[in-house]
Image (cartoon, rainbow, N blue to C red):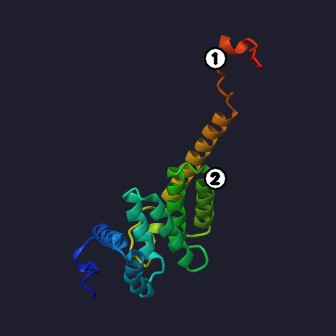
């Protein structure tokens, strides 16, 4: 095992993710940061028995650290490597992307992601708690709880859209009249 990589046997999932993200952040700050990070990630990704699980874990950790752009990139990459077809993994990633879109005040993207998650979840039986990424990630919610959470995200996105529409439709503020500008001005020509 590479001594730079955290030993998973000693750490919980959250602690492992935090240590892994700390290591990547340090590498990214170095002179050849992106190359060093890719050299670390490539062997991990190529041996990942559950495509997208490492990226999902990184995305969750980045979101907790309020690094929303990085989290969104992780979730997008995780989504892109998942096998085709509906799965609870796909649903969970879509929900996280909806949450990030709400945090960015992008009600349209939040609605789109939440609707995709709801549609995918409706076609699935069971619940996320029955094993996400082969049981490597905890998801302690039932299918009904997941659908309820998606409903709440959709309501929040609709509320954000309504607020934005109200702000746009409100009359623009009127400037107070200034008596200086109400009178015609004469400019000497010569």
For this rendering, which residue is in front, 65 or 90?
65
Q: Residue at x 58, y 54 (%)?
A: 110
**Image-quadrant location for residue 114:** bottom right
Q: Residue at x 54, y 57 (%)?
A: 98
Number of marks in picture: 2
Circle 2: is it few (<14), some (14-19), or many (20+) Cα within 10 Å? some
In this image, 188 relative to 11: left or right? right
The disc at residue 108 is: 2
For this rendering, which residue is in front, 164 or 57?
164
In this image, 58 relative to 161: left or right? left
Residue 73 x, y percent position in the rendering: 50, 67
What is the secondary structure assignment of the residue under circle 1? loop
Q: To which residue does mark 1 refer?
A: 176
What is the secondary structure assignment of the residue under circle 2? helix
The nearer-to-camera label among 1 and 2 is 1
Identify whether 58 is placed above or below 41. Answer: above
In this image, 170 relative to 127: left or right? right
């Amino acid at each position: 095992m590479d001594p730079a990589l955290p030993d998973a046997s000693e750490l919980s999932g959250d602690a492992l993710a935090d240590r892994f993200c700390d290591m990547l952040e340090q590498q990214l700050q170095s002179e050849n940061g992106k190359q060093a990070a890719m050299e670390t990630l490539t062997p991990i990704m190529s041996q990942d028995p559950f495509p997208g699980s490492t990226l999902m874990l990184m995305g969750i950790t980045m979101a907790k650290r309020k690094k929303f752009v990085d989290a969104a990139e992780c979730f997008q990459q995780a989504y892109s490597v998942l096998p085709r077809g509906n799965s609870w993994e796909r649903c969970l990633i879509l929900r996280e992307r909806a949450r990030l879109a709400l945090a960015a005040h992008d009600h349209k993207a939040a609605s789109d992601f939440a609707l995709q998650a709801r549609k995918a979840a409706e076609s699935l039986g069971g619940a996320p708690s029955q094993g996400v990424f082969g049981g490597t990630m905890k998801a302690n919610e039932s299918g009904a709880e997941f659908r309820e959470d998606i409903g709440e995200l959709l309501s929040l996105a609709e509320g954000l859209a309504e607020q934005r529409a109200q702000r746009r439709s409100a009359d623009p503020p009127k400037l107070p009249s200034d008596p200086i500008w109400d009178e015609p001005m004469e400019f000497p020509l010569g």
